[in-house]
Image (cartoon, grey):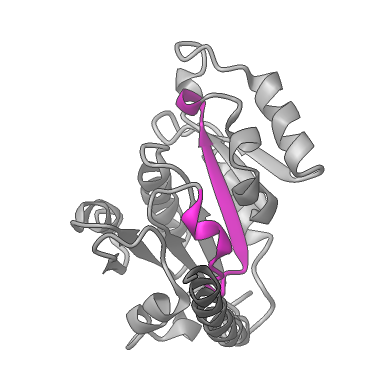
Amino acid sequence: MTLPRILEVRTRILKANDELARALRRRFEAAGLLVVHVVSSPGSGKTALLRETLARLAARGLGVAAVVGDLETDNDARRLAGAGVPVRQITTHGLCHLEAAMVEERLAGWDLAALDVLFIENVGNLVCPTSWDLGEGVRVALLSVTEGEDKPLKYPGLFNTADMTVITKIDLAAAAEFDREGALANLATVRPGMRVLEVSAKTGAGVEPWIDELLARRPAGPAAG
């Protein structure tokens, strides 16, 4: 008998989140800021890829920053801060996803117009983050070769809502017996035509094309140029 009430509350929460996310998106676009929302399972290599990405973008003279979500600890935030860029932590204390209000709170005091790219690293989860808009301009799904090629079929919701997929840890593809063609076929089945990139944060393979792809998606505005 409580199910309709639960659904009603969830609908209201999602509606409020979406309204705030739209407001955040307007702020980001007005500042010419590209916001990249990265979603993946735990252990996919997203922190390693983001650290390498942040360091390379900063070396190009771009203003970059990151917001990191974790259930507990600030380990990933401290790792990303090693790239020498501003990083802020969101600790959800058990909540399996980030919400727009959490992101808005962490933006306090940042001059968005001084940034070119902001990364949001969500909690490691392939299900919960799917429904939550954070105001991002680009949503990226990461798929590690160690996870297997069937993840897009098992978790179609994530890949359906992503703008691109990045296959990570390609240096381990042979050892993991990763079926590359199968993975690409599965991604095409779930999201035909989606951009797919392949990278290794360890060797650097594919990192520059990944960065170039992101920069090509920057919105027009005061910070873009």
Compared across the picture, whether 73 is left or right of 154 comes to left
Q: Residue 61: image x %, image y %?
A: 45, 65
Q: Quadrant of residue 19?
A: bottom right
Q: Quadrant of residue 198?
A: top right
Pick the front one: 13 or 42: 13
Compared across the picture, whether 151 is left or right of 194 comes to left
- Which residue occupies 55% across, 76% down? 14
| Above or below: residue 224 compared with residue 192 | below
Q: Quadrant of residue 219?
A: bottom right
Q: Residue 181: image x %, image y %?
A: 70, 20
Residue 172 visible within the image: yes
Pick the front one: 223 or 4: 4
- Which residue occupies 44% across, 72% down? 99
129 part of magenta stretch: yes
Q: Residue 107: image x %, image y %?
A: 38, 81
Q: Residue furthest front?
A: 1
| Above or below: residue 32 compared with residue 38 | below
Pick the front one: 7 or 166: 7
Quadrant of the image for the C terminus?
bottom right
Q: Residue 157: image x %, image y %?
A: 63, 50
- Which residue occupies 64% across, 21% down? 180
Q: Across the whole image, how many numbered discs are drawn on residues?
A: 0
Residue 209 visible within the image: no
86 part of magenta stretch: no
| Above or below: residue 203 compared with residue 210 | above
Magenta range is 127-147
- Which residue occupies 77% across, 36% down? 188
Q: Residue furthest right?
A: 193
